[in-house]
Image (tube, rainbow, N blue to C red):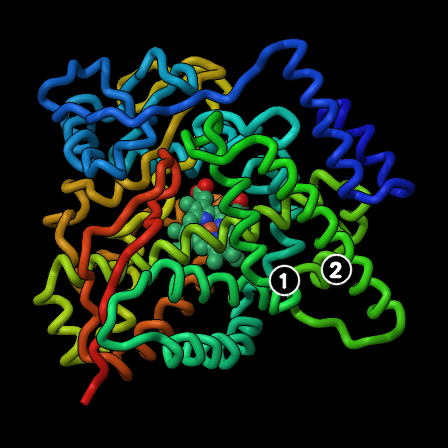
Amino acid sequence: MSVLDQVINKAQSTVPMQRQVQGMQLFQKARQLAFGDKQPVFVEEEIPDVDEVALTDIDMSNPFMWRQGQWGPYFKRLRDEAPVHFRANSAFGPYWSVTRYDDIITVDKDFETFSAEPQIVIGAPPKGLDVEMFIAMDPPRHDEQRNAVQGVVAPQNLDEMEGLIRSRVQEVLDSLPVNEPFDWVDKVSIELTARMLATLLDFPYEQRRKLVYWTEVTAASASATGGTSKVDEMWRAVADMAKSFSALWHDKAARLAAGEKPGFDLITLMQMSEDTKDLINRPMEFLGNLILLVVGGNDTTRNSMSGGVYALNQFPEEFDRLKADHSLIPKLVPEIIRWQTPLAYMRRIAKKDTVLNGQFIRKGDKVVMWYASANRDERVFENPDDFIIGRPNARNHLSFGIGVHRCMGARLAELQLRILWEELLERFEDIEVVEEPEYAQSNFVRGYTKMMVSLTPIG
Ligand code: HEM
């Protein structure tokens, strides 16, 4: 924890959290002026075909790889020719790319050699906005904090949530325009994800889009992932989150103290756990963990909802099979998550010198585990670029990672997708993507920003 964080944490009892965040922003602005640290600017240029590039020049951190559809051939070449590949310089500094399935499992499972601290993205968020979250902590701290909140997605809680999720999906689908193009990303993927996040947090329902906006802004800084968020905008979002979430915390604490039956939402669970019941007094950790849950659940689930529709349009025979046999839905879900791989990677730092698949990695080196490549590794998945409902090993995808950090929300994401597809196939004969989708600028999130579709109702 930085000295600044310690000061902030101490001040919590007397100064409202959003004021502390604003104070930090001023401090960082002054620092920026004094030391001149600036966010990088990324300008899109055409990425050459992979055969025209020297192996050592391959830079998978380019935030336009995904948007330009070049990631596939680049990863294939790395898997075949340099599965543990060193890029000596990039906008994010030097880093190793690990691209084969088996090597990624080795790294992800070995937290003693490969640390998730202090960040899991390739770069670093703007100074001061590098809030603490357990996805970027090693055991034992990681385990304590994860244990405190994972009840929110425990099977029993999910069973209770299923009916609510279904009714919200039905409401959204029944309000969609039919036989006229609309943006699926906005009207379905974002809307449903916002509703799910509001449910998890017991956040004021009518303000649910704020959760999406905040996470979009905080997760997309240029220095962290090559994204487009402005630093001032990020600070404002964090201050607003601090205000909203601390109000929610105090409101819930007061209701609990007054003897109200505890709910199963995230904040109540934090308040009930020994390890996190005083989290409000550690604002950076408090914010970090809430941001983690909303960021974790936002881009990922949302882009699986868009990716599934896109994949089925790319593979119309698979779509026909699905329409003819709805019992394929449970097999559809893992294939969507494999094919899409909503988060391209997680990053680690080597804690000691080590050797990985013949390459010598030094203590302190950045190591990027490219899940997007692992899920297309032909050593594991036959015809990996094809979308095949019922692929025998689809469930072995690495989109959720593996090891101590394996995605906490995996079952919830799967539940959401299953319900979405059950309800869609009940209503619509066809969901046609009518123009090429637009993609996010990021080396981390494989996101769709717009996808125009047209629905044909059944009957
Ligand atoms: C961790 C992907 C949905 C919450 C992760 C990791 C990945 C991931 C790759 C890191 C794994 C590792 O380092 O080994 C996804 C994908 C999703 C999804 C692809 C949807 C298709 C969700 C949802 C939530 C969530 C809905 C909200 C409840 C988290 C949390 C962590 C995490 C809290 C940190 C776990 C830890 O550090 O122990 N997710 N996620 N995720 N995810 Fe998800």
Q: Residue at x 63, y 53 (%)?
A: 147
Q: Is disc 1 in contact with disc 2, using a CB cutoff of under 8 Å?
A: yes
- Looking at the rendered image, the quarter that the N terminus falls into is top right
Residue 383 falls left or right of residue 241: left
What residue is shown with label 1? 201
Considering only vertical position in the picture, is 15 above or below 433?
A: above
- Looking at the rendered image, the quarter that the C terminus falls into is bottom left
Question: Does the Cβ of the disc 1 residue fall within 8 Å of ligand 1?
Answer: no
Q: Position of residue 159 (x, y in %)?
A: 51, 77
Considering only vertical position in the picture, is 250 above or below 439?
A: below
Determine the secondary structure under disc 2.
Answer: helix
As measured in the structure, the alpha-carbon distance from the residue carrying label 1 to the one carrying label 2 is 9 Å
Question: Which of the 4 image quarters holds residue 388?
Answer: bottom left
Question: Label 2 sits on what residue type?
Answer: Leu
Q: Is residue 218 visible?
A: yes
Residue with the most extreme front position? 180
Q: Residues within 10 Å of mark 2 (few under 14, many from 20)?
A: some
Q: Position of residue 156 (x, y in %)?
A: 56, 74
Q: Residue at x 61, y 69 (%)?
A: 205
Q: Position of residue 233 (x, y in %)?
A: 58, 37
